[in-house]
């Protein structure tokens, strides 16, 4: 992807910048990456304005690193000789401006409506990449009626979101960053915000509130996981406005134990998101619930054989309803994702890298294999599958990009099958050509490959099983590659209590009701055991418990291009689990570009843009074998939903 050229920058001179700003309206957005010097410039501009007798105000809009006020909030301040004096604040209860950008925009808008007349500076959060950065930038400019966007940047870099900036229709002032500007590390920022938070709660009180008396809003953790509540920031809200903010000490027997400032009031509405004081005291962003470390012991048939020479690094395992997904060879090994459907004694494989750690019994139960492309680390395990399926087993389907039929046939033809008889493994090989599936059937021991009729498909839907569907898109890796989205179908269960309340007996009509509701035919009529006739929609609302399906997306080996990003973001939208390659660190971005792979940053930005629940990164370059935490750290800087390996 071609990088835009650096843009000419004005020198960093607060007095000169103040003169220019005064000629272009009274609302200025200070914009730039974290640590670029926005808060420092806001102070220096306020001092210059003060010397001319002008009253200035500022909204600090970064809840993770506020220029003043305290973390987890956005604050309105007025400049005084001693610094910014807080006039009002709005609680967000998060440090993540990108993830919770819509609540942030609403909170900043409420503050600006409270502000007295005067010159207004808005110190924007340092989210300047991806969809989150774009939406924050355009949202602030449009919602807050910004006159000028002052962009702090380094001369060696292109302006962040340059196209969006110059399409806003407001004055843009690109300015050189402060010479001493330096992005602080994660620990430095965590310690600073923790000091601010502890100072705010220094004079506090504790109170107990019955959870049943509260309306919980935001993104509270599950009520049945008490430990997830301890240390969470919380705020009492009245008609959308903040009344007080504090910290949850514990949840016990339906009672919340809360710490608040001495004079703070409470309301019936409690806001809780992901800002959390850890056991070590640091204020951080909590991992989205159920995404973090492995918290369960998978069944034996899910886990690969142990190996004394295993060096694949962390091995992600995630649990879905009735299924487990295991990255067999870890984040450094050959890609091979095993999706085990337990009730059906059935397995799906995504890619076919080194398969030696899977049992022969699993090979017997593989019904479908979804191959991204035919590089050896993605297809080399086919020989294991081929050997393991000698016998009386049903045909196994293999999906992949154009050329797959030739690749599979080539591996089969490289073996002498003179003694196999009619027990040779059977495969249906399916090549994906645009919106057409080119199919062929092959059985070892028979030289001829039987062509099957082509199948047209729409909207990427290549498998529509009674239990699940699989969609695909074609991406670019300097060769076509396929990414896949697996979605389990919704499940419908009868509410037996409701059935008894209606005085109805169970029977075949319930299966008919389920079929009609699954098909979306709510207007159809059903004859009941008492010979009355009711609409399917009415009966479904009263009798059926609907459990939505879950979505897992698998994508690997793709170049960081705009077309790839757009297509994959759409495929992964709202995925429960997004398995995505994260091959290189940003410092090795040239290697990523040359080989057609994603960096950790690109992976994280795609996941955030797709609003996935959990990001499961894999396919790390082995150059990071001794420091996988560096990849996870870079991922977590741009995405708060990364599944992290268990801490040792």
Image (cartoon, helix red, strand yellow):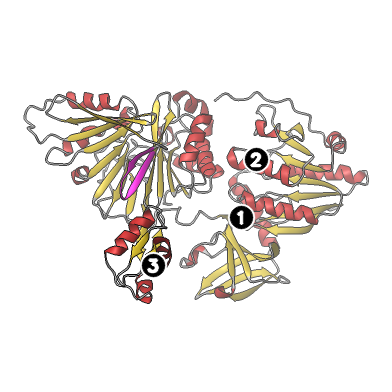
Taking the image as shown, residue 447 lies to the left or right of residue 94, namely left
Q: Could you say which disc has been placed on residue 183 in the image?
A: 2
* Residue 186, above or below 547: above
**Residue picked out by circle 3:** 543
How many tags in the picture?
3
Asked if residue 462 lies in the magenta stretch, the reply is yes
Q: Which mark is residue 94?
A: 1
**Of pointers 2 and 1, the one earlier in the residue sequence:** 1
Residue lying at 6% horizontally and 30% vertically, measured from the top left = 419
- Is any atom of residue 127 visible in this view? no
Question: Label 1 near label 2: C-beta < 8 Å?
Answer: no
First to last magenta residue range? 461-471
How far apart marks 3 and 1 lie (CA) works out to 39 Å
| Label 2, residues with CA under 10 Å away: few <14, some 14-19, many ≥20 | few
- Which label's residue is closer to the chain start, 3 or 1? 1
Name the residue: 14% across, 24% down: 447
Q: Residue at x 34, y 61 (%)?
A: 513
Q: Secondary structure at mark 2?
A: loop
Q: Is residue 487 above or below residue 458?
A: below
Q: Badge 3, how many Cα within 10 Å: few under 14, some, many 20+?
A: many
């Amino acid at each position: 992807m071609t990088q835009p050229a650096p843009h000419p920058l004005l020198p960093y001179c607060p007095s000169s910048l103040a003169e220019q700003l005064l000629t272009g309206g009274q609302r200025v957005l200070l914009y730039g990456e974290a640590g670029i010097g926005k808060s420092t410039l806001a102070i220096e501009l306020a001092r210059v304005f003060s010397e001319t007798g002008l009253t200035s105000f500022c909204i600090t809009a970064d809840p993770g690193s506020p220029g003043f006020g305290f973390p987890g909030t956005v604050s309105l301040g007025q400049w005084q000789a001693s610094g910014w004096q807080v006039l009002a604040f709005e609680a967000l209860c998060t440090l993540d401006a990108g993830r919770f950008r819509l609540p942030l925009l609403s909170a900043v808008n409420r503050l600006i409506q409270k502000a007295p007349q005067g010159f207004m500076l808005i110190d924007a959060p340092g989210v300047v990449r991806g969809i989150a950065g774009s939406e924050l930038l355009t949202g602030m400019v449009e919602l807050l009626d910004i006159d000028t966007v002052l962009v702090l940047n380094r001369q060696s870099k292109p302006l962040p979101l340059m196209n969006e900036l110059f399409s806003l229709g407001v004055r843009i002032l690109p300015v050189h960053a402060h010479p001493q500007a330096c992005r602080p590390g994660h620990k430095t920022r965590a310690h600073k915000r923790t000091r601010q938070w502890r100072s705010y709660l220094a004079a506090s009180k504790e109170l107990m509130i019955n959870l049943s008396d509260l309306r919980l809003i935001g993104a509270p953790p599950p009520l049945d996981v008490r430990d997830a509540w301890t240390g969470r920031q919380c705020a009492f809200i009245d008609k959308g406005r903040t009344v007080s903010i504090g910290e949850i000490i514990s949840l016990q027997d339906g009672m919340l134990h809360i710490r608040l400032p001495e004079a703070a009031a409470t309301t019936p509405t409690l806001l809780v998101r992901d800002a959390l004081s850890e056991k070590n005291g640091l204020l951080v962003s909590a991992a989205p619930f159920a995404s973090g470390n492995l918290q369960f012991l998978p069944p034996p048939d899910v886990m690969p054989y142990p190996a004394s020479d295993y060096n694949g690094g962390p091995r992600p395992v995630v649990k879905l309803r009735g299924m487990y997904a295991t990255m067999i060879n870890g984040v450094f090994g050959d890609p091979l994702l095993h999706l085990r459907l337990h009730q059906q004694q059935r397995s799906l494989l995504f890619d076919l890298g080194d398969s030696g750690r899977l049992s022969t019994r699993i090979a017997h139960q593989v019904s479908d294999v979804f191959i991204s492309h035919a590089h050896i680390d993605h297809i080399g395990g086919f020989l294991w599958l081929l050997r393991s399926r000698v016998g009386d087993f049903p045909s196994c389907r293999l999906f992949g990009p154009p050329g797959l039929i030739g690749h599979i046939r080539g591996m089969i033809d490289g073996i002498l099958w003179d003694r196999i008889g009619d027990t040779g493994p059977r495969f249906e090989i399916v090549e994906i050509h645009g919106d057409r599936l080119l199919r062929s059937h092959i059985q070892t021991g028979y030289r001829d490959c039987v062509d099957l009729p082509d199948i047209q498909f729409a909207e990427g839907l290549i498998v529509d099983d009674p239990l699940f569907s699989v969609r695909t898109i074609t991406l670019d890796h300097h060769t076509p590659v396929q990414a896949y989205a697996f979605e389990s179908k919704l499940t419908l269960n009868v509410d037996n209590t409701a059935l008894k309340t209606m005085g109805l007996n169970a029977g075949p009509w319930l299966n008919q009701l389920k079929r009609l509701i699954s098909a979306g035919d709510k207007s159809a009529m059903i004859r009941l055991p008492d010979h009355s006739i009711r609409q399917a929609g009415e009966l479904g609302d009263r009798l059926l418990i609907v459990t939505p399906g879950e979505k897992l997306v698998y994508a690997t080996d793709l170049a960081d291009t705009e077309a790839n990003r757009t297509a994959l973001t759409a495929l992964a939208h709202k995925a429960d689990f997004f398995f995505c390659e994260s091959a290189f660190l940003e410092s090795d971005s040239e290697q990523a570009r040359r080989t057609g792979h994603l960096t950790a940053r690109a992976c994280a930005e795609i996941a955030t843009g797709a609003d996935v629940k959990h990001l499961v990164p894999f396919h790390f370059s082995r150059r990071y074998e001794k420091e996988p935490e560096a990849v996870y750290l870079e991922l977590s800087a741009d995405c708060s939903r990364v599944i992290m390996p268990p801490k040792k």
